[in-house]
Amino acid sequence: YSKISGCLWKSKKMKKIKINKKKGILFWITGLSGSGKTTFGKAIHKDIQKLYGPTLMISGDNIRKIFYLKGHTKEDRLKILKSYCRFAKFITNQNINLIFAVVGMFNEPRKWNRKNISNYIEIYIKSNLKEIIKLKKKRIYHKKNIKDIVGIDIRPEFPEKPNITIINSFNKPKTKIAFQIIKKIKDNIV
């Protein structure tokens, strides 16, 4: 890992991504709840739109509210994630970019995305769960009657080969981190 602007980046060279210009790009931002996925997704949205065209930004929380998705067991989460993947393919097939910030800590949906979505970029926000809880980054960790939380009740399957890995220790401004994410994306898209 190398340190850049207060964040640690995976130093392994990212494979160049050749973009199919007839389809949108899926920027799949994954990580534990409270790691900063939605924050960074919103922070890069304007730049992604300027660089690559029409872009939607959706979080897992948003889409759960829109479609009244209530299940949180591992099985429910996998089923919902598979729906998110099909939705993302539908949007990107219409030449619209999609920034999708979702916990998504299961290998199967990410493998499906790599196989079925032409322009897929996986961004993993890696954060320490104890730090997320200590800093009260997400209310779910502090409610008494909530169960089926990824990282506590459900064992997460961390990304094995994301295109970009950011270690977020919550000590640097989101704008600096967002700038570095955009730089990494630009450097690695053909």
Image: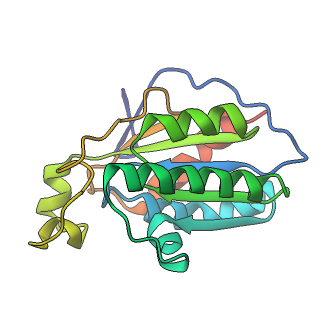
The vertical placement of 11 against 171, above or below, is above
Residue most extreme to the right: 22
The vertical placement of 183 against 59, above or below, is above
Q: Is 27 on the left or on the right of 135, as rendered?
A: right
Q: Quadrant of residue 46?
A: bottom right
Colouring used for the render: rainbow
Residue 94: where, in percent of width, then height? 85, 58
**How many numbered marks have been drawn onto this rendered protein structure?**
0
Seen at 27% across and 57% down, the residue is: 170
Seen at 67% across and 58% down, the residue is: 87
Q: Which image quadrant: the N terminus?
A: top left
Residue 176: where, in percent of width, then height? 46, 56
Q: Is 78 on the left or on the right of 47, as rendered?
A: left
Seen at 16% across and 54% down, the residue is: 131
Residue 31: where, in percent of width, then height? 38, 48
**Nearer to us in this view, 137 or 68:** 68
**Nearer to us in this view, 164 or 172:** 164
**Nearer to us in this view, 6 or 26:** 26
Seen at 67% across and 40% down, the residue is: 120
Residue 9: where, in percent of width, then height? 42, 34
Q: Is 128 on the left or on the right of 84, as rendered?
A: left
Q: Is 176 on the left or on the right of 167, as rendered?
A: right
Q: Quadrant of residue 155?
A: top left
Q: Which image quadrant: the C terminus?
A: top right
